[in-house]
Image: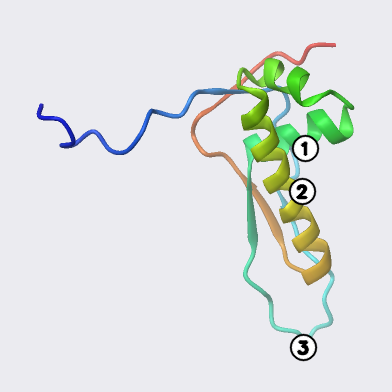
Amino acid sequence: MPRGMGWGRGRRRKMRMIGFIPQVKHFHPALPPMVPPKTPIFMTYEEFEALRLVDYEGLTQEEAGQRMGVSRGTVWRALSSARKKVAQMLVEGRELIILPQGNEEPGMEKE
């Protein structure tokens, strides 16, 4: 196939090892009855896993990257995005929905 035709842009996304699939995937604020709902915020499993490993488990970004099978830079980007989304959810009173992207692979949680 000629270059630039039909292949899409860039490389395929690498599979991410996810050690914990969240059981609760939807959070919504307790708003007064007459307040119209705001647009929801969507968080990926990758962002959730980076947030869980670094902020909840206390791992370094390097260790989290090893667990997820990605680089430290990828963890940093996912973590930064996840933190911004959680802050937006809290400050703006928006609902948060956690969804898969399709490139996650459930992995065994290491103790």
Badge 2 density bin: few <14, some 14–19, many ≥20, Cα 10 Å: some
Looking at the rendered structure, which numbered label has been put on residue 11? none
Which of marks 1 and 3 precedes in the sequence?
3
- Foreground tag (3 vs 1): 1
Residue 40 lies in quadrant: bottom right
Tell me the kind of residue under disc 1.
Answer: Leu
In the picture of the structure, the residue carrying the numbered disc 1 is 51
Q: Is residue 5 left or right of residue 78?
A: left
Q: Is residue 95 above or below residue 83?
A: below
Which of marks 2 and 3 precedes in the sequence?
3
In the picture of the structure, the residue carrying the numbered disc 2 is 83
State the residue at coordinates (64%, 37%).
45
In which quadrant is the C terminus drawn? Answer: top right
Q: Is residue 20 above or below residue 93?
A: above
Looking at the rendered structure, which numbered label has been put on residue 34? 3
Q: Is residue 109 above or below residue 31?
A: above
Tell me the kind of residue under disc 2.
Answer: Arg
Question: What whole-number distance in Å separates the C-alpha atoms at marks 2 and 1?
Answer: 7 Å
Badge 3 density bin: few <14, some 14–19, many ≥20, Cα 10 Å: few
Compare residues 48 and 61 and report the one nearer the observer: 61
Residue 78 lies in quadrant: top right
| Picture coordinates of residue 104, whole percent (x, y) | 56, 28
Circles 2, 1 touching at the beta carbon (< 8 Å): yes
| Picture coordinates of residue 13, whole percent (x, y) | 45, 29
